[in-house]
Amino acid sequence: MRRIVSVLVPLGSLLVAACSSAAPASSSGAERAAQSIQTRSVASTATGFTPWSTYHRTASRSGRTANPPGTLHRSWSKRLGQAVYGEPLVVGTTLIAATEGNQVYGLNARNGNVRWRTGLGAPQRLSGLPCGNIDPLGITGTPAYDGRTGSVFMVAETRGGHHTLWALNAVSGHKRWHRSLDVLPHRNRKAEQERSAVLVAHGRVMVSFGGLAGDCDNYVGYVTSTSVTGLGRTFHYAVPTAREAGMWAPPGPVLGRNGHVYAASGNGAELSGRFDRSDSVTELSLPRLHRQSLFAPATWRADNRADLDLGSMSPAMVPSLKRIVIAGKRGTVYLLHEQFGGVGSAISNLGGCHAFAGSAVVGRTVLMPCLGENQVRALHVGRRHLSWTWSSPPLYGSPVVAGSKVYVADRGSGDLFVLRLTNGSLIQRIHAGTLTHFPSEVVDGGFVFVPTLTGITAFRG
């Protein structure tokens, strides 16, 4: 994100390791168990829909599902009072959507009727923040659902710049527990923003934080780890730089094939001296988020000077090759081992994609969201090389693949594009509405659900 101020704040010892936060404000073991059984029962009787429990469907953010809809037509649209920045979730036949007004809705996925609605406090107005571009600022990151507990998790920003992790019952919307994630006491919580998707894996809820648009004031990128029960310590890893290095990409932390979590960070404060572990991808172990390895481009100093975040995209996992792909604002795509070797340790690199937000992975093909080129580009991944195979018509959004079709909600036009996976050619184009900065979509049960600045638009095929 663009640097507005250049004052550097000394690094505190709290940035390197883990810390604990208060116990959850409320939780009930009996209530959790009973409602978990209810949630699984509802999900198991659903017909047509499969679980879409997290950003791009899987913890690895693969963005792939099996069954594409036919020719699309508008099925329904629902105004929800404020913008929906994150992807909705599908649990049974319920579509769960969260708004910048801190309202969480459970909608009938087939017709948009409201099944439940839960408010999580007054959102933060832009006038009370040091910078930013979302007003009001409430729930921005995509929530995540955990089938074992039947809970759906999201982070709400409320008046005063507080960031709270909430667990709701996915069937009823009832509040189960909540916990503050403002775990860095010497930072300005009003300068932090939770734009990234929540990740649930191995009984933990992971949440990453970056800064506001403008990169103002005293913040640093960090990721937290909390039990899905709300009990015990909240651990965190913070980038050990004086300031910035936001972990803000919309897909958020990504689960690797090895069970570790990978998080990308943006430009940090160091411009000429010793490497500060910013502008990087970091491999973290669970539950405590201990750093295992790290990759950064050899150009990290120049990236920091020019605001060329590597962390504008989350890592793309290519499990069949045990490889990872990452790109950022510089426009360079890097091919990496799953265990990183430090600065300049990429296997190979390739120019041609200023990447923002989320990719989709099909075998050895990664569909890259190239904002700078205003295209989705298909990247062929080998063990030691990368090559481009096709580019889409002019459009930008985070792609999702269903069968042999690619779905992209285009930020500029507000249209949903359907492309052929084989060559990127256009199959269909249909208007969805005014879209958010980094749009995405959900493809499930013969429907495509597109979050907009006013709510949800649903297409059926």
Image (cartoon, rainbow, N blue to C red):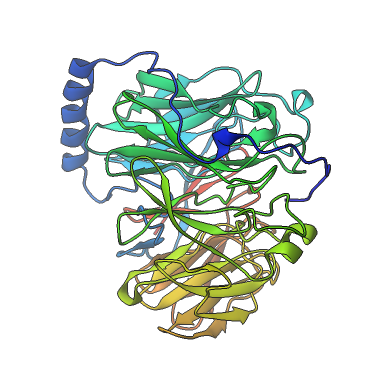
* Residue 59 in the figure: left or right of residue 203: right
* Foreground residue among 4 and 438: 4
Quadrant in which residue 398 is drawn: bottom right
Quadrant in which residue 331 is drawn: bottom right
The answer to whether residue 140 is seen in the rendering is no
**Quarter placement of the C terminus:** bottom left
**Is 121 placed above or below 461 here?**
above
* Residue 175 in the figure: left or right of residue 399: left
* Residue 68 in the figure: left or right of residue 432: left
Quadrant in which residue 344 is drawn: bottom right
* Foreground residue among 13 and 280: 13
Residue 250 location in percent, x, y?
Answer: 55, 49
| Residue at image coords 25%, 51% | 48
Residue 46 location in percent, x, y?
Answer: 21, 43
**Is 242 placed above or below 372 here?**
above
The answer to whether residue 399 is seen in the rendering is yes
Residue 392 location in percent, x, y?
Answer: 59, 76
Query: How many numbered discs?
Result: 0
| Residue at image coords 35%, 13% | 26
Residue 407 location in percent, x, y?
Answer: 48, 64
| Residue at image coords 79%, 59% | 305
* Foreground residue among 64 and 149: 149
